Image (cartoon, rainbow, N blue to C red):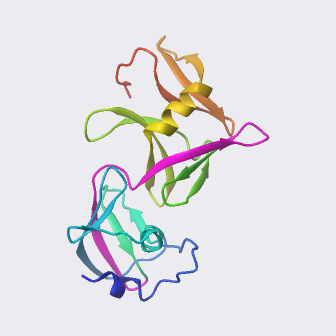
Amino acid sequence: MHLDSLLVDIDASGGIPPVDRWAPERAGEMDLLIAADGRWIHEGGVIGRPRLVRLLSTILRREDDGSHWLVTPVEKQRIQVEDLAFIAVDAERDDQGNWHVVTNLGDRVMLDDTHRLSVTATPRGEWVPEVPVRFGLAARLGRNLFYRLIEQAEERVDERGDAWLGLTSGGAWHPLGRLDGESPCV
């Protein structure tokens, strides 16, 4: 499938369309993979146009069964995602002490009760924090950002006596990882 035909009904103004409310009847599969390192690979070639990748990311959603779809008002195309759709590449703390995370595709999310960090396994079995972004999609913390946040982290002990490093933002605790390095038991 050509990307142009999928994007014909999408406004390229940069906003996020309401893909969570679209329920097109036409469905198919596209040879598109979002690699764990953030590359978008279409029919074996890396998409090298950042504006195109950003536009495609605005019509992406993840279903409850874990499948990922590019969705327009008239059709949806299933794609493959190796880990998570986005990578969190930057963060900053505002004047109120809340953290705002920025993804590799320009989404900005404040860490709060709705957008809470959780420590989950990557496909390689490493335990790395992720944050929900939108439409069932999440961003894995990039290595550089993870280490920057660890430098700002505080220690807390959970109800089982395990020590964690994390951040407080938006009135919620956001774990970055257990101090003993073991995988979290969820």
Q: Is residue 72 magenta?
A: no
Q: In this rendering, is residue 107 above or below 70?
A: above
Q: Residue furthest top?
A: 161
In the rendered view, does 119 fall on the left or right side of 173? left
- Name which quarter of the figure residue 86 lies in: bottom left
Instruction: Give the residue furthest to the right.
Output: 95
Residue occupying the point 52% across, 29% down: 175
Q: Name the residue at 38% across, 29% down.
A: 186
Q: Which residues are magenta?
A: 73-99
- Left or right? Give the position of 31 relative to 65: left
The image position of residue 19, as x and y in percent, is 47, 72
Give the residue at the far front of this rendering. 48
Between residue 28 and residue 146, name the one nearer to us: 146
* In magenta segment, residue 93: yes
In which quarter of the view is residue 16 placed? Answer: bottom right
From the viewer's side, name the closer residue of 93 and 65: 93
- In the rendered image, residue 75, in percent from the top left (x then y), is placed at 34, 82
